[in-house]
Every structure is written in structure tokens, then in C-alpha cells.
Image (cartoon, rainbow, N blue to C red):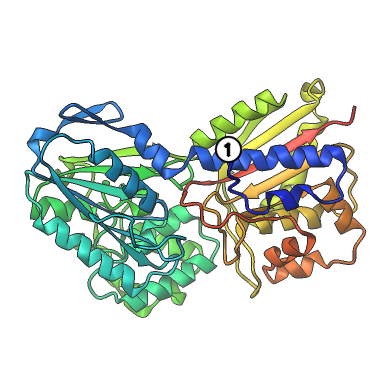
């Protein structure tokens, strides 16, 4: 029996649709199901971590387990609950007398309770995207574990997207309240997550490689870091703000970014003073590539959206689609991207090169941003699709079209949806209605719009955490 991840799958295909519209919706939604199944954290861990006799194999590297007395599991992020449980299943197969225990910060909205999860790993429910006291308490517990370790111990650190907020540990002279305030400012801005995480590195005594520094100075334990990427381009030092990796940036970048987006006067005074008055001091800088603290740190990327896109491509090929990867660096403001999307689809659909293909699929990944102006309910993919609809209103489309934008975490923005879909049926409904799309956009109320027309996609939290995906299916009229 196949268990559908998308909870409203049947409702999305049971409307008064033409056969081709139903076909496209089924294929598009199946792509989302395949993507989520592919990048489930437990699968990614089991694909990368093996016990072979007395050795631990991480991808192509071997670690002799006889060298270690204890194993500790620490970390944080949206995907780390399932990562930790999967790792625990693997560690149970170790024949040697090795003890293990752990402490992980996970999102408070995850849909399972503490009871029965693990008697060795503590799961601490913290807040995302705005950090809270529970996250701070969790980090202190993690550091207590780290400081009890010694050079005969092995530390597993699990990191996925969301770790920046879930593992708050503000640097000296910055309070947790300051951290909350600047995170609200950054999230409401148009700053890409890559640049937000550069700033976060310098607000923390944990991120930007400083967790590795703490371990080096306290125990010199060996650390294996398993990372699932939610960052465009999979740049490891930006995932969770890179607590275990060398930092190629410098503190001057913080001022550059804040000035670039005109946010310097909007951040807490305590933070502004640190970076405007003292940025030349070396104690602001994070450890760099040649720092000895990284000698016994082994970072592994075990999953990203790329594996999901590969499986989607296989499925679409079976369905007869010619697939084009149109971007794996999807970025920029959602509203602007939505406006430009029609031009790109039209160009592909009318290009002579592709005339011989009746079925074309465009797939991409990345993460758009939303400029918050209103008080509505929405998310970046929904805003992008609503902007697309507003732009193409009354334009003629002489082929069957489906567009899905989805956050594979299962929840985007302040909505309960993972994204939405747009097709010829939706376009027809919009063109024959008096709906004020501009007003929905102005109020950042994209979810209320898609809920109204019945094409929001609902899955609930999936436990996954990679980049968003966009799937565009073009089916020519025969």
C-alpha cells in the first residue's frame, strides 16, 4: 500500500478537470511524492553510514571503532530528528562495547512526541525561524556533552537547514532578545539565506566553525559531521551557518551586507556597535581553513535536492517527457521571478528546437525570497505562483500547462501549505472571476488565495530539509 505524503492529493485531482489537466496534476504531484521519499533523512543517513566489522564507513572513508571509547551524538536542524534515529539504528549493530548517547535540537512543530523515540538521545524542541530560550538551553546541554568528551571519543554532529535558529548561542554582549530582533529584521527583508547565514556566523559563539574550536580546545575528540543541504549550491559553510567548518568570510562582510540592504539602522544597537566600532579586532573573526581545530573534523554532505531531481527526471522520462534542468540556483524575489516565468515558459514552448517534443518538463531548485509588506498568510512558492497568475491574466496559452512550486519541508512561510499548483484550469478560473490578485499580493496573502481556489498543497511537516523545487510540465495539443 502506497501512503501518500500529500494529504490533499485526491482533492487536487478530483475537481471538474479535463482529462489532460487531471493527467498533468497526477504526474506533477507524483513528482513531489518521489522527491520527498528520495530525500527522507533516514534514507540519506543509511545510504552514507555503514558498520563493516569493527569499522565505521562514511561514504568512502573508514574509521576504526576500536580507537573510540564513547560515541556522542549532537546537532540541530529540521531534519535531525530522523537523522539521529536512523544513526541510532546503525550504531546498534556495533559489536564492540561502545556506549553512545546524544542531545539534538529539533523544531517544536514536529509531529511526534518524545515518548518512545530513544532512551539514549534527548530531543529538545526549540523554535524556528526565531530562536528561543529552549534552543539556547539545548545548546548549553550539547556543550556540556562536548566538554565531557576526550580524545578517545567520537562525536557525531548532525546538521541540516534550520540549525541557525534552532541552535542559538549568542556571542558576548549580544542577548538572546537581540538575536530574536535581528532575526526578525533579516527574515522580513529580501536578503537571500546565504547572506543571512553569513551574518548569523558572527552573532554566535557556536557557528562559523566555532563548535570545532570548542571541541578542539576542550577534548580534541574526533568529530564526524553529517550534513543535509538546504542551501543553493550546497556550500557547506552556510548550511546551519557552518558550526563545524572553516569560515571563508570576514566580519567586514556583515557590515557590507547590512549596508547593501539598508538594514544597519534597523538592527539592535548592541549588535550595530560590535560591528561598526570593533570589526577590525581579530577576536571577531571565525576560524579559517588552516586552523588546527579542523584537524580531526570530517564533514560529509549526505544529501541535497539534487538526488530528488535525479529521481524526478527518471520518472518523467518514463512518462515520455523531455526534461530540461533550467536552474539549480533559483533565487531572487518570488514576485519578480513569477513575472519572468511566463516569458521563459513561452520561449521554451515556442522554440523551434523543442517543437518535436510533445511533452516537455522544466525542473529547477533553489530558494526564493519574499519581501514582507502585508499581514497575510503565504510562502515564497505560493507568492511566486500568484505573481505568475497576475502577470499572465488574459494572456493566451495554447498548450496544457502545470506549474508546481513546493518547499519539501512541508510548510512554507507562515502558512500550513508546502506550496501550490497552477494549471490551465486555475488560469481559466482567474480569468473568469473578479478576484483581485494584486490585493492578495500586496498583502502577502498568497495562501488565502490558493486555499480559496483549492490548489494549495498540504503535506504537514515532512522531516526533510533541502532546497525548494519547481516543476513545469508542458503538454502540447495534438
**Closer to the camera, 100 or 60?**
100
Q: Is residue 174 left or right of residue 99?
A: right
Position of the N terminus, as image quadrant, is top right
Q: Outermost residue toward the right?
A: 432
> Where residue 200 sits in the image (x, y, percent)?
36, 61
Disc 1, SS: helix
Q: Is 272 placed above or below 85 here?
A: below
Q: Which residue is tagged 1? A: 34
Q: Residue furthest front?
A: 1
User: Considering the image in quadrants, where does the C terminus appear?
Assistant: top right
Give whichever of 255, 159 is nearer the camera. 159
**The quadrant where residue 47 appears:** top left
Residue 59 seen from this side: yes
The residue drawn where x is 57% and y is 51% is 407
* Residue nearest the viewer, comparing 456 with 299: 456
Q: Position of residue 5 (x, y in %)?
A: 58, 48
Instruction: Name the residue located 82 percent from the left edge and 51 percent from the top edge.
Output: 15
Q: Is residue 474 left or right of residue 366?
A: right
Amino acid at each position: 500500500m502506497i501512503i501518500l505524503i500529500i494529504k490533499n492529493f485526491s482533492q487536487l485531482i478530483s475537481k471538474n478537470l479535463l482529462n489532460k489537466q487531471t493527467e498533468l496534476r497526477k504526474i506533477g504531484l507524483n513528482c513531489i511524492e518521489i522527491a520527498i521519499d528520495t530525500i527522507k533523512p533516514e534514507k540519506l543517513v543509511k545510504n552514507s553510514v555503514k558498520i563493516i566489522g569493527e569499522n565505521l564507513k562514511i561514504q568512502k572513508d573508514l574509521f576504526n571503532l576500536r580507537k573510540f571509547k564513547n560515541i556522542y551524538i549532537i546537532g540541530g536542524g529540521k531534519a535531525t530528528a530522523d537523522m539521529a534515529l536512523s544513526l541510532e539504528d546503525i550504531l546498534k549493530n556495533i559489536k564492540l562495547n561502545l556506549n553512545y548517547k546524544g542531545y539534538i535540537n529539533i523544531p517544536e512543530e514536529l509531529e511526534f512526541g518524545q515518548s518512545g523515540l530513544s532512551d539514549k538521545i534527548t530531543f529538545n524542541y526549540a523554535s524556528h525561524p526565531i530562536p528561543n530560550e529552549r534552543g539556547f538551553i539545548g545548546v548549553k546541554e550539547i556543550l556540556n556533552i562536548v566538554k565531557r568528551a576526550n580524545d578517545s571519543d567520537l562525536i557525531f554532529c548532525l546538521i541540516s537547514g534550520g540549525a541557525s535558529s534552532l541552535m542559538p548561542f549568542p556571542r558576548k554582549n549580544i542577548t538572546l532578545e537581540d538575536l530574536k530582533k535581528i532575526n526578525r529584521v533579516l527574515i522580513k527583508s529580501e536578503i537571500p539565506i546565504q547572506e543571512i547565514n553569513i551574518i548569523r556566523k558572527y552573532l554566535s559563539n557556536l557557528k562559523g566553525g566555532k563548535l570545532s574550536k570548542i571541541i578542539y580546545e576542550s577534548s580534541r575528540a574526533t568529530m564526524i559531521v553529517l550534513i543535509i543541504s538546504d542551501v543553493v549550491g550546497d556550500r557547506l559553510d552556510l548550511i546551519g551557518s557552518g558550526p563545524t567548518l572553516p569560515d571563508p568570510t570576514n566580519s567586514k562582510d556583515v557590515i557590507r551586507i547590512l549596508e547593501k540592504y539598508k538594514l544597519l539602522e534597523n538592527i539592535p544597537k548592541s549588535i550595530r556597535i560590535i560591528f561598526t566600532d570593533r570589526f577590525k579586532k581579530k577576536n571577531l573573526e571565525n576560524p579559517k581553513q588552516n586552523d588546527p581545530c579542523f584537524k580531526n573534523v570530517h564533514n560529509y554532505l549526505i544529501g541535497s535536492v539534487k538526488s530528488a531531481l535525479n529521481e524526478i527526471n527518471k520518472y518523467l522520462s518514463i512518462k515520455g517527457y523531455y526534461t530540461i534542468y533550467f536552474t539549480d540556483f533559483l533565487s531572487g524575489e518570488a514576485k519578480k521571478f513569477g513575472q519572468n516565468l511566463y516569458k521563459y515558459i513561452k520561449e521554451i514552448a515556442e522554440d523551434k528546437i523543442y517543437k518535436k517534443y510533445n511533452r516537455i518538463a522544466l525542473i529547477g531548485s533553489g530558494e526564493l525570497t519574499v519581501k514582507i509588506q502585508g499581514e497575510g498568510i503565504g510562502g515564497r512558492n505560493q507568492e511566486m505562483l500568484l505573481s505568475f497568475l497576475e502577470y499572465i491574466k488574459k494572456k493566451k496559452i495554447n498548450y496544457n500547462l502545470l506549474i508546481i512550486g513546493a518547499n519539501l519541508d512541508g510548510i512554507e512561510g507562515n502558512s500550513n501549505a508546502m506550496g501550490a499548483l497552477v494549471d490551465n484550469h486555475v488560469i481559466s478560473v482567474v480569468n473568469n472571476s473578479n478576484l483581485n490578485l494584486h490585493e492578495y499580493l500586496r498583502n502577502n496573502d498568497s495562501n488565502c488565495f490558493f486555499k480559496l481556489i483549492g490548489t494549495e498543497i498540504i503535506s504537514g511537516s515532512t522531516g526533510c530539509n533541502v532546497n525548494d523545487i519547481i516543476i513545469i510540465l508542458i503538454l502540447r495539443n495534438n
